[in-house]
Amino acid sequence: MANQIDIFWVVLAAMLVFVMQIGFLLLETGFTRSKNNINVAMKNIADFAVTTLLFWLFGYALMFGVTTSGLFGITEFMPELDVNRLDQAAFFIFQVMFCGTAVTIVAGAVAERVRFAGYMLISAIAAGIIYPIFGHWAWNGINLGMATGWLSSMGFVDFAGSSVVHSVGGWISLAIVLIVGPRIGRFDAQGKPQHIPASNLALATTGAMLLWFGWFGFNGGSSLAFNAVALRAFGNTVMAGSAGLVMGMFLGQLIYKRTNVDLLLNGTLAGLVGITANAHAVTLGQSVIIGALAAVVMYGGQMLLERLRIDDAVGAIPVHLCAGIWGTLAVGIFGDLQLLNTGLSRIDQIGVQILGIIVCAAWVFGTTMVIILVVNRITPLRVSPEDERVGLNVSEHNERTDLLDLIDAMQRQAETGDLSIRVPVEPFTEVGMFAQEYNHVMNNLEASQAEAERLREQELEARVAVENARLKSEFTSMITHELRTPLNSVVGYSGMMLMGVRGTIDEDARTMIQSVEDSGKHLLGLINDILDLDKLEAGQFTMHPAPVEMRRLVPEWMETMRVLADQKGLWLDAHFDAHFPTVMTTDSERITQIAFNLIANAIKFTDKGGVYMRLQTDATTWTLAVQDTGIGISAANQALIFDRFQQVEGFSQRQYKGTGLGLAIVKLLVEALGGQISVHSIIGEGSTFTAIFPLDSSAHLGRSHE
Ligand code: ADP
């Protein structure tokens, strides 16, 4: 392999293999959660650099240096590129890329829970010791066209590394996931596997395609020359990848009744891994079978891992280990014996392939287990559960993302129940838009919560008010009943004594008994007023609207009240305006109560002149006004007299008996009839009380007081 085109081909292939690093990066970040994506990406790029340096330092020497009994190499430490042997220089570059690939497989399997530093240590051990030693056994001498490793000298064939690269990566992965354990939440308490969502399957798909692209160099370049073998390997790689994809698709339909993304992508990669060991020695038809079966083997491996509760974050073990074993075995089953050129019969070839598979398992899995168990004892590889929850982007690199900030704020809200928390809005990003909408929702939620709170309070207040009213009327009716009975006896007996039932009584005794009777009557009046008021306020006062002939009713009032007016030498008169209707719908008993109250007050507070009642109508209302020529009410007092127990201070209280409840009752009665009452008064000249009612009061009465 000395000609320029061969060298160019190998260098080009090396570059393609590097592209696989990008493929792995995208595939793994896409398959895992975004809270870990930065960490996954960092591991992918960093392991390449670490493995490259170590492979140059001593890995390459162990793998391709002059052998000691086919076990390990002892020359070529820190090799320099020899300008006189460009083919060897190209070979070194190509192998550096290979080593990177083997190691980077591990990053995917152990993703989302292994410390960055721990992963770097694993990479170093893998690239420095584990990979090169097995590589020596299988590949030592290939750059010189010889088979000098102990496995290859027995006829073991692994063209581009189904075992050397992929199974090695897979076995290391398996050992480490066993040591660090599954991600939190991957298996539930009963051990049932739970789906941990992928963050970006389009990205994972791009990654798979880049891997496929890089694989052309991985397999095609392994011929180490631009020849028929290279082209056959290239062609078989295209076919096997496609067959793996279609089988993955088919398995998805069969098992999940839909195209399962994991199976489709990992099916493709399994197909590629499967063809890797034998790409140079099979036909296109065989490559299709190998690729398709590789996808089936991959699915079987995946099922087995789940059954054993082993968590591989991206399916790296089923793809690289299981399909790698299959590909290595397929060399013996399908490989053209002529092309394999080992001189073995098919059975023997299969036998040595199986031996290689077992040796690979024992060396790689065994060594990794021993070393990593010790390392893990000294410094745990796994992050703390809290860090795992937060995500490795933050815990390992202190890199936040807008999404993470959003989730944090939401979690804080969930924990505190504080609806006033708003999430940070990063403008111009999708997450930012989402955050903004979330804040809108929170605004609305908070507002409606406040409104609900307000309504609840209102309802409570209303309920308390109703309960208070009930207690109050119960109390009132009890008290009044208890008082009325003895008061009736007081009034009755003192009246009888005044009438002389118990014989004549002297003047002093008469004055005293008269006072007893007056006080008793006053108290009875007060009790009746309180009862009326209470009923009115509780809305229990039933109105009985009916047609009333006012022109007959009013003269009756006049006749009754004239006795009082005559006692004080006052005139009393009533006047209807011309249009006043003969029949009016109102409650005759209540309107009488109103009129008596107003006329009695007018007489009580008038000493000369008289009292005059006027009844008027206009288009929509009718008016009952009582005017007197009495003492009048000051403006300040006019505002108060309709309140309970309000009597104008000073002389009137002593001079004129009363309870201070009359006008409060009148006002409530007027309102119960749908009307309004007002007073107009001038001190020393007299007062006018005016009650205005709607003409058609029946509707109003029916509504509020029936
Ligand atoms: P009372 O039973 O004490 O009369 P009211 O509620 O009927 O109670 O009246 C309250 C107060 O309003 C009276 O004490 C009186 O001072 C004043 N008042 C009522 N009507 C008149 C009126 N026609 N002229 C002057 N003052 C009046």
Image: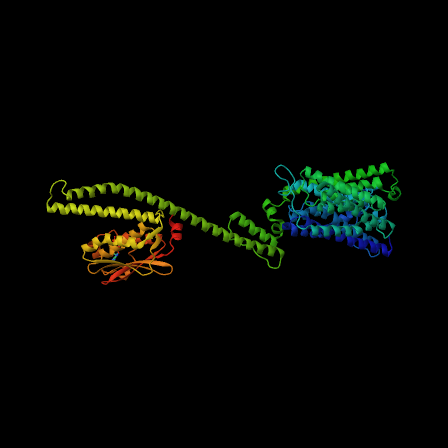
- Colour approach in the figure: rainbow
Horizontal side of 24 relative to 479 (left or right) equals right
Residue occupying image coordinates x 23% and y 47%: 523
Horizontal side of 613 relative to 5 (left or right) equals left
- Picture layout, residue 289 above or below residue 643: above
Image quadrant in which you'd find residue 677? bottom left
| Residue 31: image location, x then y, percent | 68, 48
Residue 391 visible in rendering = yes
Viewer-proximal residue, 667 or 162?
Answer: 667
Viewer-proximal residue, 499 or 173?
Answer: 499
Horizontal side of 678 relative to 70 (left or right) equals left
Residue 155 visible in rendering = no
| Residue 89: image location, x then y, percent | 81, 54
| Number of numbered tags placed on the structure image | 0
Viewer-proximal residue, 306 or 439?
Answer: 439
**Ligand 1 located in image quadrant:** bottom left
Viewer-proximal residue, 604 or 367?
Answer: 604
| Residue 25: image location, x then y, percent | 70, 51
| Residue 513: image location, x then y, percent | 16, 45
